[in-house]
Image: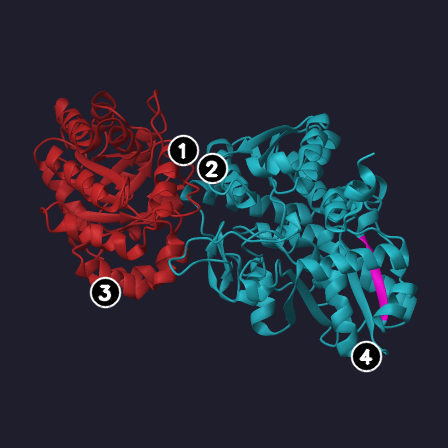
């Protein structure tokens, strides 16, 4: 795959931010939380606050990669009867709201159940940019990879501090859009301490690929975002937005987004290593 | 060895594999390598066999259940796993994995448990081998099974109640996986059944396959031939795969897995995962599972906590799809009748899980006829189930209050 193709939809938005001398901001909220309509408003607030890429979470009954904040939001969304088609409708409403790329972050079973080809086609038709798949590794992802390529969707797989260089090479070769580097060995959720595992992982990942590398897990404020922005192409924030939504509604989400958007612009950076 | 499956990535046909976070993939590769090297190392397998023999009390008896046979109308042989230390087949798996944990140089073990049986077995193995032990247990289950919580604590384990999701077994597995992602450097996740991402289904099978290996040899000695059928209950499926593994190549031996039919399969309130026939991905592997139209996991229902799980090990799904083994549900009510029947005819109080296998055997005996010999895995003893049985049969209200 040529690098231009692998940059994909989300990658182009991150590279545009990088060209401005800053890291991109990738912002996550689950669909259907606190309600379907309220979720759409909250996600639009991410756009209004300056996020460069949007991730919409597909709530799932058994979210093994998520900490309590996102688990709870998913439980509430599902208890209210959220369906996969409501997630696609949320994507459609957010995608038509702006030019910001909209990805879906999802555990694998709901996609397999919906039908991989059918989901890829419906996501593309809704204006979605691709999928982030936290429990799908490329070795198990042949069907998704084919469907994504057919529909020109981004395929964001994850790399971890425990990934060997061989695995990083395999995973990045199958990514389109960006590579999601998990900053810590652990689940989603805000953390006080900066991870000392993230920077070496980003360096190893960049040695393997030219597509952007985003760092997620644990980032919750502008200072942390600025710290990660010093070495990553994009900063990924999730559970902090759920907390902001709980505390201050869509206005709270927008405020946090603006603060993080300021964080990723704070330190002058160079991109000599690219 | 008969096991040609799984393939290198853990696939049994289209089932199995690894649907796990990337953070766990390299550790799973290390585990696979450590397990394969251990199984090829005579020092490891000798130690494992010695522990099974001298600590767990294997080989377990093969018992010719003549009075039960009279009622059933066919000859029934019981593989007495209920007589093992801790009262179930599960000791085989926990000793194997705990010994492997030591070999890998890890010092901490985590486990999930539903009713507490696997938690108690794990806590036992950790006490025996001097390992730190943390058990995740759904909050609902910690309340229902306070005695097992006390057992685990007495054995030195820490029990963490899980307060998310349905607060039962599947959520305990989720929480153990979350712990493992953050602790894998020094921690082994001692999964309690032949499910999960590769290498767990194959590794657990190989640690419990002594059930079938012993029973096959014991049958040849007793009968001069193999039994006509081998029967076991299936929740996640560890005792069943442990029994079946030895017989899979013996094509004349029919294999039957008995699933939990709960209120009755037709009511929809059951744990009969394979019977329900929906394929998906849960807890790291592709297999049959109980799910709704959108792929969200559906809660299972069974009077037996050990069978009350919405998934099943991938090798069973493969055995079902290829037709090598047949799976059928048995309701709570039929299982409890078999529970009482075994107590009255043989003086053996089985685990309610194992009572499902007995109930299935009574049906299969009618189908195969009086000349047939049926080998049944009596996977555990019923002491833990006396509260449930007392309530079910009205024994506690009638006699227990004074």
Left or right of B3, for residue A53: left
| Percent coordinates x, y for residue B143 in the rendering | 62, 34
Q: Earlier in the sequence, mark 3 or mark 1?
A: 1
Disc 3/disc 1 C-alpha distance (Å) = 36 Å
Question: Dots 4 and 1: beta carbons under 8 Å?
Answer: no
Q: Quadrant of the C terminus of chain A?
A: top left
The local crowd at label 3, few if under 14, some if 14 to 19, many if 20 or more residues have their Cα within 10 Å, is few
**Residue in view at x 81 percent, y 61 percent:** B215
User: What stretch of residues is rendered in magenta?
Assistant: B75-80
Are labels 2 and 1 assigned to the same chain? no
Which residue matches tag 1?
Answer: A68
- Circle 2 SS class: loop
How far is the residue under mark 2 from the one under mark 1?
Answer: 8 Å
Marking on residue A150 = 3
Q: Secondary structure at mark 4?
A: loop
> Does residue A15 sit above or below A1 in this rendering?
above
The tint of chain B in the picture is: cyan
Pointer 1 indicates a residue of which chain? A
- Protein chain holding label 2: B
């Amino acid at each position: 795959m040529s690098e231009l193709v692998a940059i994909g939809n989300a990658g182009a938005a991150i590279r545009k931010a990088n060209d401005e001398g800053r890291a991109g901001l990738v912002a996550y909220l689950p669909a259907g939380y606190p309600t379907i309509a309220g979720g759409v408003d909250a996600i639009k607030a991410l756009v209004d606050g300056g996020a460069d890429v949007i991730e919409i979470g597909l709530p799932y009954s058994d979210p093994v990669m998520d900490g309590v904040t996102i688990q709870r939001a998913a439980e509430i969304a599902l208890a209210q009867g959220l369906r996969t088609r409501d997630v696609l409708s949320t994507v459609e409403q957010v995608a038509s709201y702006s030019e910001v790329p909209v990805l879906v972050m999802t555990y694998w079973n709901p996609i397999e159940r919906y039908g991989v080809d059918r989901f890829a086609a419906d996501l593309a038709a809704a204006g979605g940019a691709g999928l982030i798949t936290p429990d799908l590794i490329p070795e198990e992802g042949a069907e998704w990879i084919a469907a994504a390529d057919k529909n020109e969707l981004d395929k964001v797989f994850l790399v971890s501090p425990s990934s060997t260089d061989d695995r990083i090479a395999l995973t990045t070769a199958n990514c389109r859009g960006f590579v999601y580097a998990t900053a810590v060995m652990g689940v989603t959720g805000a953390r006080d301490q900066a991870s000392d595992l993230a920077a070496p992982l980003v360096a190893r990942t960049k040695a393997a690929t030219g597509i952007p590398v985003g760092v997620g897990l644990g980032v919750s404020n502008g200072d942390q975002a600025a710290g990660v922005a010093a070495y990553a192409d994009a900063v990924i924030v999730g559970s902090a937005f759920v907390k902001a939504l709980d505390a201050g509604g869509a206005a709270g989400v927008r405020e946090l987004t603006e603060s993080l958007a300021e964080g990723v612009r704070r330190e002058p950076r160079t991109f000599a290593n690219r | 060895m008969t096991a040609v499956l799984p393939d290198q990535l853990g696939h049994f046909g289209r089932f199995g594999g690894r649907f796990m976070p990337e953070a766990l993939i390299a550790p799973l590769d290390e585990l696979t390598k450590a397990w394969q090297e251990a199984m090829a190392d005579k020092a490891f397998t000798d130690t494992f066999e010695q522990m099974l023999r001298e600590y767990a009390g294997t080989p377990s008896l093969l018992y010719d259940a003549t009075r039960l046979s009279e009622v059933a109308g066919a000859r029934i042989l019981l593989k007495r796993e209920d007589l093992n230390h801790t009262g179930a087949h599960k000791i085989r798996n926990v000793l194997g994995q705990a010994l492997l944990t030591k070999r890998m140089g890890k010092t901490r073990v985590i486990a999930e448990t539903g009713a507490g049986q696997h938690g108690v077995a794990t806590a036992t193995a950790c006490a025996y081998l001097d390992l730190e032990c943390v058990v995740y247990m759904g909050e609902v289950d910690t309340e229902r099974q306070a005695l097992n919580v006390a057992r685990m604590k007495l054995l030195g384990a820490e029990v963490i109640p899980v307060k998310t999701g349905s607060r039962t077994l599947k959520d305990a597995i989720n929480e153990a996986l979350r712990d493992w992602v953050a602790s894998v450097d020094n921690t082994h996740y001692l999964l309690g059944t032949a499910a999960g991402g590769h290498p767990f289904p194959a590794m657990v099978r190989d640690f419990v396959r002594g059930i079938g290996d012993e029973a096959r040899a014991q049958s040849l000695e007793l009968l001069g031939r193999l039994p006509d059928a081998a029967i076991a209950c299936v929740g996640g499926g560890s005792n069943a795969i442990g029994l079946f593994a030895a017989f899979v190549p013996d094509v004349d031996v029919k294999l039957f897995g008995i699933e939990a039919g709960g209120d009755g399969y037709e009511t929809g309130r059951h744990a009969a995962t394979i019977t329900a026939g929906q394929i998906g991905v849960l807890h790291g592997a592709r297999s049959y599972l109980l799910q709704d139209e959108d792929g969200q996991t559906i809660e299972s229902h069974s009077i037996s906590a050990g069978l009350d799980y919405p998934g099943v090990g991938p090798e069973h799904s493969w055995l079902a799809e290829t037709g090598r083994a047949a799976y059928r549900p048995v309701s709570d009510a039929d299982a409890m009748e078999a529970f009482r029947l075994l107590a009255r005819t043989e003086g053996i109080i089985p685990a309610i899980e194992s009572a499902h296998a007995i109930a299935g055997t009574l049906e299969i005996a009618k189908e195969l006829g009086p000349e047939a010999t049926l080998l049944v895995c009596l996977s555990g003893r019923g002491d833990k189930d006396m509260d449930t049985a007392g309530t079910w049969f009205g024994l506690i209200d009638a006699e227990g209050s004074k």
